[in-house]
Image: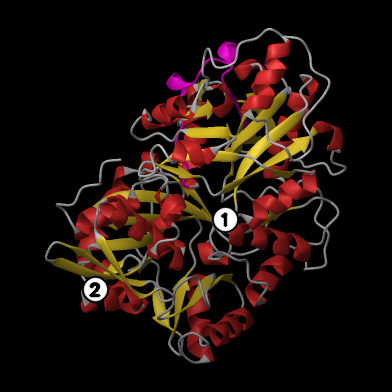
């Protein structure tokens, strides 16, 4: 094919007629071989390579179960939708284009991770875990169109310190895929780990793809973004992308249901209720919204009705809930079951508190009935710190507990139906210095990223506990952290205060699994999140800390937490076939 120096007017989509005319100049034949590029999760159907609307509509109907095909660059979508209105729909996403002549390289350097191509089975597994955590379809690398036949390439961002995959993106070279006379390319499946504390991962992945295709002599990069994704659109506008007048068509299936039906009742809920409601919909279970703000809903299947508040359901008795909420009762029940627990007593007068401190040297202070890490202070070593923490905890409950402090990692084990479904190490909120910004500014930026990744459920409080943690490390909010330095800004690992999760379900030691199930049975609770302190997830030593009767199932994706919870509520239900 001859090179083409002319390009379409800015903002114009390639049409069948224009491309046909351009290809005819070269003596090429358009439509002889319609192009369908398999991306591992479904196919990209290049609209203008199909000879007529009927053939494109028919190919969309050939979509495989569990996959998602996309027909893009469709110039006359009404003709295709008119053929199969019950099966196809117009994708409510915007297409954006960056002409490489408009691109400006970044003046800021982001450190702490590198970009490389996905190559090994381990790479694909890591990318799929990331995609599933973001509600995206996984990739089957065996189904990918080979690169020498115009197939896509996947890139990943790898953390320098841990080697973990913290982001991924797919790129398609249009010249190789379908002899694009405009020498274009496109970006798909951009995702960043919601637990990632590294700034700029998404921006660097996009820039890497741009600069990679620029080096190949291509002219532009297209991408598709949901019309209401403000954060993503803000990044793309910053990079110089502009709206493109073109259309994409998809098939109506369970995966695409929110796109063609609009927001369902799950859109009103926080992530912890939403994940359950979405699973119920997949099984054909009716959802009645009782109080979206409070996370209250009723599930109905046949003659069975179950009320829920997030993962707390009618199946949990009032007694079991009380045993979890009252940490003193939790302690007694688990101790009677022969499990390992810290020393504990109710806060009293200053002399009693000092005697307990002298005995154990390092303490934890927490409200007797509390959640989400509110009012909890750890590793207190002076009576002044203890008394101050008690006053703070009394803002959440007038009854306050003192516990002996134990070193270790914070492990959350999720038990549903008296079986371990998920386990994760919870790490406190941390920031990474860049040598320029203050710790206060880094905390604010990290909070914005955590809020965006969790639907507003996670934020680092800039309160007395954060201030105490910084002071213990020799810093304050105005300190500038050296480039590359990691700093924990909280002592507790609660997700609502900015903590992050590392899934360890696959390596959980059998002793820990057995102890968690024993604890659930002692509390007689069908769904519970149990918190332990451990030296490592694959070692048997542990100390139980507390039990949570309304654990966040969404925090443990991609483990099948919602599936097992709905199994518990409706054991005879099955997911509706796609």
The boundaries of the magenta stretch are 135-156
Q: Nearer the viewer, residue 369 or 535?
A: 369
Neighbourhood count class around disc 1 (C-alpha, 10 Å): few under 14, some 14–19, many 20 upward: some
Who is closer to the viewer here, 558 or 546?
Answer: 558
Identify residue for label 1.
453
Can residue 379 be spotted in the picture? yes
Q: Residue furthest bottom?
A: 349
- Position above or below: 327 against 469: below
Q: Position of residue 106 (x, y in %)?
A: 84, 41
Q: Name which residue lies at 76% across and 46% down.
A: 484
Label 2 vs 1, first from the N-terminus: 2
Query: Residue drawn 77% across and 63% down?
Result: 441
- Counting from the top left corner in percent of width and height, residue 156 is at 61, 32
Q: Residue at x 41, y 76 (%)?
A: 294
Mark 2 vs mark 1: in front: 1
- Residue 350 in the figure: left or right of residue 183: left
Taking 101 as reference, is 521 left or right?
Answer: left
Q: Residues within 10 Å of mark 2 (few under 14, many from 20)?
A: some
Quarter occupied by the C terminus = top left
Q: Nearer the viewer, residue 423 or 181?
A: 181
Front one among 406 and 180: 180
- Residue 55: numbered disc: none
């Amino acid at each position: 094919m001859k090179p083409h120096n002319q390009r379409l007017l800015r903002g114009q989509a390639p049409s069948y007629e224009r491309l046909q005319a351009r290809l005819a100049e070269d003596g090429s034949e358009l439509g002889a071989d319609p192009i369908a590029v398999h991306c591992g999760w479904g196919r990209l159907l290049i609209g203008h390579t199909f000879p007529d609307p009927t053939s494109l509509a028919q190919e969309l109907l050939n979509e495989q179960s569990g996959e998602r095909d996309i027909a893009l660059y469709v110039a006359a979508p009404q003709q295709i939708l008119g053929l199969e209105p019950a099966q196809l729909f117009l994708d409510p996403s915007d297409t954006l284009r960056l002409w490489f002549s408009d691109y400006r390289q970044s003046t800021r350097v982001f450190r702490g991770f590198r970009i490389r191509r996905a190559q090994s089975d381990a790479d694909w597994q890591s990318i799929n875990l990331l995609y599933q955590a973001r509600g995206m379809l996984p990739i089957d690398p065996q189904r990918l169109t080979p690169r020498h036949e115009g197939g896509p390439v996947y890139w990943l961002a790898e953390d320098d310190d841990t080697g973990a995959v913290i982001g991924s993106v797919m790129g398609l070279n249009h010249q190789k895929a379908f002899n694009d006379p405009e020498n274009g390319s496109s970006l798909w499946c951009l995702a960043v780990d919601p637990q990632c504390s590294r700034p700029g991962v998404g921006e660097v992945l996009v820039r890497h793809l741009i600069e990679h295709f620029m080096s190949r002599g291509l002219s532009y990069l297209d991408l598709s973004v949901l019309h209401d994704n403000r954060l993503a659109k803000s990044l793309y506008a910053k990079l110089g992308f502009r709206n493109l007048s073109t259309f994409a068509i998809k098939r109506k299936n369970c995966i695409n249901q929110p796109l063609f039906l609009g927001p369902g009742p799950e859109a009103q809920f926080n992530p912890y209720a939403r994940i359950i409601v979405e699973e119920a919909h997949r099984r054909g279970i009716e959802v009645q919204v009782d109080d979206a703000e409070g996370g209250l809903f009723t599930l109905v299947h046949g003659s069975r009705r179950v009320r829920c508040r997030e993962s707390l359901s009618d199946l949990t008795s009032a007694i079991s809930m009380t045993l979890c909420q009252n940490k003193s009762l939790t302690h007694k029940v688990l101790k009677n079951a022969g499990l390992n627990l810290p020393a504990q007593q109710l806060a009293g007068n200053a002399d009693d508190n000092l005697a307990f401190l002298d005995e154990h040297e390092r303490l934890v202070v927490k409200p007797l009935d509390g959640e989400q890490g509110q009012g909890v202070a750890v590793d207190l070593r002076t009576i002044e710190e203890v008394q101050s923490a008690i006053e703070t905890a009394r803002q959440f409950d007038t009854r306050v507990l003192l516990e002996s402090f134990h070193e270790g990692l914070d492990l959350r084990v999720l038990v549903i139906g008296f079986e371990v479904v998920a386990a994760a190490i919870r790490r406190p909120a941390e920031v990474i210095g860049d040598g320029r910004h203050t710790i206060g500014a880094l905390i604010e930026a990290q909070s914005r990223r955590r809020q965006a990744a969790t639907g507003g459920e996670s934020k680092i409080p800039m309160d007395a506990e954060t201030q105490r943690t910084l002071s213990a490390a020799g810093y304050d909010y105005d300190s500038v952290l050296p480039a590359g330095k990691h700093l924990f800004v909280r002592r507790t690992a609660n997700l609502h205060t900015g903590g992050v999760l590392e899934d360890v379900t696959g390596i959980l030691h059998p002793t820990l699994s057995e102890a968690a199930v024993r604890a659930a049975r002692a509390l007689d609770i069908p769904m519970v999140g149990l918190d332990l302190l451990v030296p490592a997830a694959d070692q048997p030593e542990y100390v139980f800390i507390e039990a949570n009767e309304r654990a966040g199932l969404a925090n443990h994706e991609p483990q099948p937490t919602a599936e097992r919870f709905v199994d518990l509520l409706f054991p005879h239900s099955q997911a509706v076939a796609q």
